[in-house]
Image: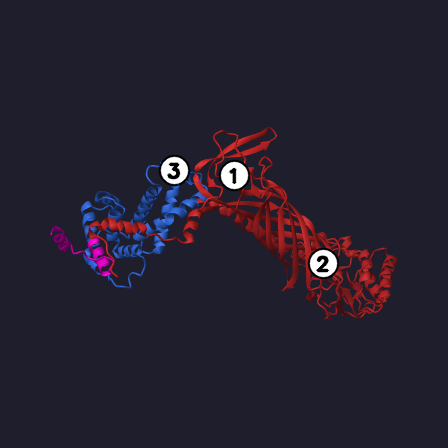
Chain colours: A blue, B red
Amino acid sequence: MLQGCLDNLSIAQEALYNRFSPRMLGVCYRYARNREDAEDMLQEGFMKVYSQIHQYKGAGALEGWIRKIIVHTCINILKKNKKFSDSVDLIHASGIQISDNNIPSLLQAKQVVECIRLLPIGYRTVLNLYAIEGFSHKEIAVILEIEESTSRSQYTRARALLEEILIKKKILQKPRENVRMISMNN
Amino acid sequence: MERRFDMSDFEQSLKDHADQFSLIPSKRVWNGIYNNLHPGSKWPSVTVALIFLITLVTVGNLNNSKKTLGNEEITAANSPGKQTNSGNSILQKNETTAKNTQNRIASESKISTIQDREADKDISRVNSANKNSAANENLSKKNNSLHKNNSGKSLNQIQTVSGLNEIPATSDASKKSILVKQEENKLVVLKNNAENSLSENQKEFFTALAKLEILPPNQNAFTYQPISSDKNALISPDRTSITHTSALPSNTQIDDPSSIITLVKTLSVNNSTTKKTLRKKNKNVEWTFYVTPLISGVSFEKKTFHPVASTSSSMVLLPNQPSSFQLIHNPALGVETGAEISFKISKKFKVITGANVNYSSYRNVSNFVHPTFGTLILTDKSGTYIKSYLTHYGNGQSPSQISLNNYNLEASVPIGLKYNIWNNGKMQIDLSSLIAPSAVFKSNAFIISSDGRYYINEPSLVRKFNMAVAFGSYITFKAKNIKWHIGPDFRYQLLSTYKNIYPNKEHFMDYGIRIGISK
């Protein structure tokens, strides 16, 4: 399949797309404002994948390599469209209405993703990059062209807000840590 | 029910849930990617569509009927309104004013010569309303004899000129000819009541008309009725009608001006400024444009594949591979479109030819394998040899199957016969059979390797030229001036898709419903 993509065979390219596009669209969906934007990001991301396929040397999984390109494509589109801002603060975030209507009744994975999408774009991006994609705050600062401290503070706020959302949606139950800890010690 | 996960592993849980999440993208995403990666693939279909449209427009223009009319004006006294009753000779007027009006009517069409033979030909085309058809024959003979009995000059002859520039006002030609003016499709002979102002020829002409009882000396107007003839008209002996083609308005009475006698003639003239060509549709020739959606399949000379062990020691058949197995192929959609022209050679038979473009394809069932080498055993004049190819596609005998599309895009020039088996005037049924040499200008070929384990992509083995036969039966009916032809069509590729060096033979087969229109 890889060789076919290098030879610009449409069948191989379609096979690669069919294999990785569902998961990659899930990635884009976490960054995008809506599904249409997510598909646009996906399309542009795969175009970059095919144009840079010759750079893949086989080190690491192909999916991870594609995912990295997709994520960078999503970030670039957000920056280009000025959808991302590092000035989002908690005041803005606290205005989010959390209700049962926000999230349809779906599988838990989708519920979690939908909760993530409830976050403001800036919080959501930092959360995605740090908690899910595994970038460090230093790397996030370079990618998003913000300060590392901004990245840290944004992530802290994003996590707190997401926890609140998940608890309110009863997807997450706040553990009684102190009680547990005490119980275990005893 | 509350769902739980450990908050101390918040990030990990978040990542796990997010990684599980996937969405199926809509088709537009892949279409957009494909169009960007392969922009050239849409050009053949765009080109074919353009050729089809251009052919349609061209044939539509060719089939339109147009009339030939010549507007001619010879004389200087051009418009009837300028006729005077002052008794001045019109001829003199023409001579004297020829120069003045040369520029004005120089752009007018020229007058053609009405030859004696035209009158003879018209004999057979006299108006059926004319009761005395025999008189017409005598009429023309009399005309000829009378005219010949005169000074030897044919009074029927009106000199052909191209604009006034060719008629010097004082030339002999102008003195001898009968000056006329053509308005649209009628010929106006200019006459003045003062006969002494007429030329000798003109006098003789009108005298002859009077003698033939065609035109009374004092009668200056009469009606005329059109007939379907396309030849020159003839004055009827009853003095009241002139036969001419249907191009003229019917039952038009020309009264006065008293100085004008209108003779109606149809002329086939070349008019450089106002020429309109009369083209009659040839009923024996018919153009048809059609499109045939198809289901394409393929037939193989051997339905079951027998693997051939490679002579290379590194290639062996897998021990669990059956000694022979059936390759799975699925039909796919195709299309044929083109133009067809038919020539009627007898009541029932027509010869048909034309040009078309055909897209045929089918799908091989395959599966992904790790990149490996597959071999083809090929045979040419120098002998048998092995060629190896890198491939990713298995023979489809495993689960998780995929489809590999083989197709041919070809242009062909079919030629054949059409036989009409039934016709009731409103509908007809025809059978056709054609043979179509074709040129393949785009193809894709996944070929099974000689050991039967892999599919190899090698389009260079596809023949560039091929031959097909086609059979069809069509119902033809007319609706709103358009003929529709609908019926089943079958096409079979005679020669194998691949060159002779590849031993496995395959032939495309197409079944479809043809939809055609003609006018």
Q: Earlier in the sequence, mark 2 or mark 1?
A: 2
Tell whether position B156 is magenta: no
3D distance between C-alphas at marks 3 and 2? 63 Å
The answer to whether residue B100 is seen in the rendering is no
SS for dot 3: helix
- Determine which residue is flagged by label 2: B421
Q: Position of residue B81 (x, y in %)?
A: 68, 67
- Determine which residue is flagged by label 1: B452
Contact? badges 3 and 2 (CB < 8 Å): no
**Neighbour class for label 2 at 10 Å: few (<14), some, many (≥20)?**
few
Contact? badges 3 and 1 (CB < 8 Å): no
Please check whether the numbered discs 3 and 1 fall on a single chain. no
Q: The disc labelled 2 sits on which kind of residue?
A: Ile
Q: Nearer the viewer, residue B347 or B13?
A: B13
Subunit under mark 2 = B
Q: The disc labelled 1 sits on which kind of residue?
A: Gly
Subunit under mark 3 = A
- Determine which residue is flagged by label 3: A54
* Image vertical order of residue B409 relative to residue B115, above or below: above
